[in-house]
Amino acid sequence: MEPARSETTERTDSLRSRSFRITVDDGRDSFFALSIEDVSSDDAWLMSDTVVALENER
């Protein structure tokens, strides 16, 4: 694992986000995941397997 890097230059690249419904155990269980990616870098991405609707957080 590599430590996080801080970039001080301003970037104008856009981020891409995608959502997934992942099914496991031959369809017996599923969960949602969210991916946020920097389209200009194969190494800059974040994926979360815990997605909760914002309106449920209030």
Image (cartoon, grey):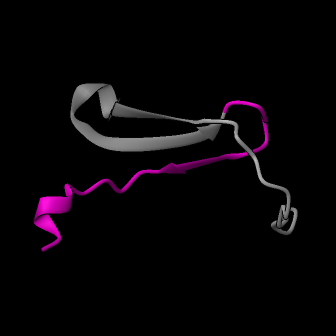
- Which residue is pictured at 70% across the width and 41% down the height? 12
- Horizontal side of 33 relative to 43 (left or right) equals left
Q: Does 58 appear above or below 32?
A: below
Q: Quadrant of residue 50?
A: bottom left
Q: Position of residue 41 (x, y in %)?
A: 79, 35
- Which residue is pictured at 85% across the width and 64% down the height? 8
Principal secondary structure, stretch drawn in magenta: loop
Which image quadrant: the C terminus?
bottom left
- Horizontal side of 47 relative to 26 (left or right) equals right
- Which residue is pictured at 31% across the width and 53% down the height? 51
Q: Position of residue 43 (x, y in %)?
A: 79, 42
Which sits in the foreground, 18 or 25?
A: 18
Which sits in the foreground, 20 or 30?
A: 20
Which sits in the foreground, 43 or 9?
A: 9
- Which residue is pictured at 30% across the width and 25% down the height? 26
- Horizontal side of 12 relative to 22 (left or right) equals right
Q: Does 6 appear above or below 44?
A: below
* Residue at the bottom extreme of this rendering: 58
Which image quadrant: the N terminus?
bottom right
Q: Quadrant of residue 36?
A: top right
Q: Position of residue 9 (x, y in %)?
A: 85, 57
What span is in magenta? 39-58
Q: Does 11 appear above or below 7?
A: above
Residue 25, magenta (yes or no): no
Residue 49, magenta (yes or no): yes
* Residue at the top extreme of this rendering: 26
Q: Position of residue 16 (x, y in %)?
A: 54, 33
Q: Does 25 appear above or below 9?
A: above
